[in-house]
Amino acid sequence: MQNAAMNIEDKGGDQLVLHVGPQHPGSGHFRILVTVDGDYIVGAKPDPGYVHRGAEKMAEYRDYIQNIPHLERPVIIDATGVTLPYVLAAEKIIDVEAPDRAKYIRMIMAELNRIISHLYWLGIYGIFLGHSTMFMWPMGDRELFIDLAESIGGTRVTFSYVVPGGVRNDMPTNFTERALKTFDYFEKRIEEYKKIFFNNPLMTARTEGIGIMTKKDAIGLGITGSNLRACGIDSDTRKDEPYCLYDNVDFEIPTRKEGDSYARCIVRLEEMQQSMNIMKQVLDLMEPGPIKQVIGGVMRGEPGEAFVRTEAARGTMFYHIVSDGEKNPYRVKISVPSFRNIIGMTHLLVGSRLADMPAIYWSLDYWPVEADR
Amino acid sequence: METFEEFVKRILTILFWFLLISPLIIFPVLFLLIPILGIDVTFANEILTATIDPLKAIKLADRYGVGPSSTFFKVAAFPGFTFAALVATLTILYERKLMAKAQLRVGPLYAGRFEGFLQPIADLFKLLGKELVVPEKADKTFFWAAPIISLGLGASLLAVIPLSPTSYIARSDFSLLIPFAIIGFSPLVVLIAAWASSNKFAFIGGLRALHQLAAYEIPMLISILGVVVLTGSFDLMKIVEAQKDVWFIFPQFLAAIIFYITILSELERIPFDLPEAETEIVSGWLTEYTGMHFGLLQLGVYIKFYVLALLFTLLFLGGWNGPAFLPPIVWLLTKLFFVITMIILPRAVLPRLRLDQLIRIGWAWLIALSFINLFIAVIESSLGVI
């Protein structure tokens, strides 16, 4: 009986090389070359770059306003998270400052986007562990937050809402009422999520003690965001270097000591609660006022450069913009959290079992398009 | 684009015109052929009348050995293959609707006026219309053989399982053992399919299935021995008769739980669906199968689903025993429906296990527990509980 299963790129012996992705239900636009020996992974080589579009270079051919919808593309799932630091950096170059109300609305949009992004992640994590209900529930509840964001931004995901000088338009008048209703509903849903998924003994058996990242490794590899907080480090750009008006609100940074897949999951769940907490406070603090500082003519700034770091859904989003006084930026450098978070993945995968691969891979919340940009 | 309803309408229209026109051609040909071939004229007459009179059709079928009481009808229609395939397809539909309700969705909705109840037919047409892709490096013979063997094994399981005191295909003193002997072959089908696909993911899936099925068939067999000890018979008829007063789920509760867990594993359902774990190994041993190949494999699996649910009903839930105001078969189907629901439900609430956890549960827990259950059965039997 002829069989070729064993001799495709076979290294000999008992080892088998698996191409997980880019056409694999558990990969995304991304490939991991996994070498397995029996049920154990002995080698893992992440292979990003399938969706590289040269977003940084393309940004040099667009002016400051055109760059907003452009730079939103890599992370449409967290559109405000990726455009907010760009706009903040552009504001430094153009030398304008947004009014207070605009800053508060930006915070609301950023936190809404964080929840939308985390719910998407949670849904995929559910199906990665074979839990189809946990795929459908967050995806359904995500629509509520998308509706909220749509009522402010006008579109479902790619809002292009934050612009230099403020935000595009004011919130609808009934937003507070709608938002609080949604938050109440979602608080209840989080308890149900815990019942069916996070406290599910099979789920904890699958994720606890899997893919442990130590504090030292996490710092050494430059991991940011929820993955870092799951290692026991309470690092959050919103607290460390407050931008917008995050120093006016009071919130906690959820952390866990374990650094395993479960810790990364539960940290993200608690972050969603904190996001709602922030939004509730912001809705209280907000006062009527202007939402935009009008900039006449084409936006351009003095030659110089600006650095801005914010906390996007996946971690610290860093922008470095260089201006030479023209209407287009001279250089836009984006340092995205996903790319830094993926570096640790090889270390986490080697030595674990093949079945743990999705549980570890997606617990890092890697977004290939963001990493490749 | 035509909708599914328009598609069905088109098919029905074609059928209508075919039925209307075909007699105009077939009957003259038939009448011309009768004198040439020397067929008895009364026979031709009977066939023609049978086409419009069902009672005469049954009588005619009876005379030629294919009537409702004949073995052929039992094997082919009820309680044999057609009935099992019908239950299997309805199970698929029921599973999809139930999962959808649990997940705040609507599920199949558009094929058929009421809640998409024609979805199985739509699925069938879809699968029939798909191209059968056989990988270039696959072992063609075994690749083609696996779906057929799978369905054949599923169908042969039906041979000795009774549905009621009167409706069964064959009677055997070992009717409990025969299905398990046939189920013992199912790892082979998986291995043939996995090996012949010549795909790494299929290969891993096949090996996983082999581990899993080997680990769970032993506790499955030992857990049903408790029932055998209590009744002293391997005959399903006698086992059901012994449950007239008390169902075996009460004295043999542990066995029922072990049997239920092993059913989930045997059917590769969540949390034991490792051989088909999508996010790890694409679709496991089913990866390379398309179209009706896939359909036949699935039908085989769902007929096995029906048989195992039926065995659970017969062994632990008293089979067709029930108050006399309903016929036995209705009681059996009611209990079967309940068991099928119980087998589907874990998919809505549980994630997938890992291979080492699965093997540990199988070898370390279930086998030990099933032996403990055997002792319980022996004690109960010696005390004369039943």
Image: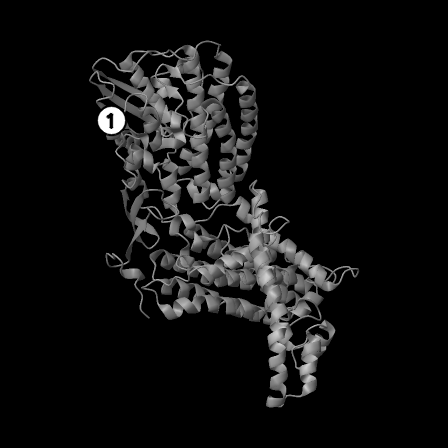
Q: Which residue is at the front of the view, A223 or B59?
A: B59
Going by the image, does B90 lie left or right of A87?
right
Whether residue B238 is visible, yes or no, is yes
Counting from the top left corner in percent of width and height, residue A33 is at 28, 48
Q: Residue furthest right?
A: B325
Q: Is residue B88 above or below residue A67?
A: below
Q: Is residue A226 above or below residue A10?
A: above
Residues packed near mark 1 inside 10 Å, few (<14), some (14 to 19) or many (20 plus): some
Residue at horizontal 64%, vertical 77%? B71
Residue at horizontal 36%, vertical 16%? A242
Counting from the top left corner in percent of width and height, residue B77 is at 63, 69
Q: How many marks are shown on the rendered structure?
A: 1
Whether residue B185 is visible, yes or no, is no
Residue at horizontal 39%, vertical 52%? B282
Q: Which residue is at the front of the view, B292 or B366?
A: B292
Going by the image, does A322 lie left or right of B30?
left
Q: Which residue is at the front of the view, A94 or B14?
A: B14
Q: Secondary structure at mark 1?
A: loop
Name the amino acid, label 1.
Tyr
Q: Is residue B55 above or below residue B133?
A: below
Dividing the picture into quadrants, the one containing residue B19 is bottom right
Going by the image, does A305 lie left or right of A5?
left
Q: Mark 1 sits on what residue? A: A61
Counting from the top left corner in percent of width and height, residue B70 is at 66, 77
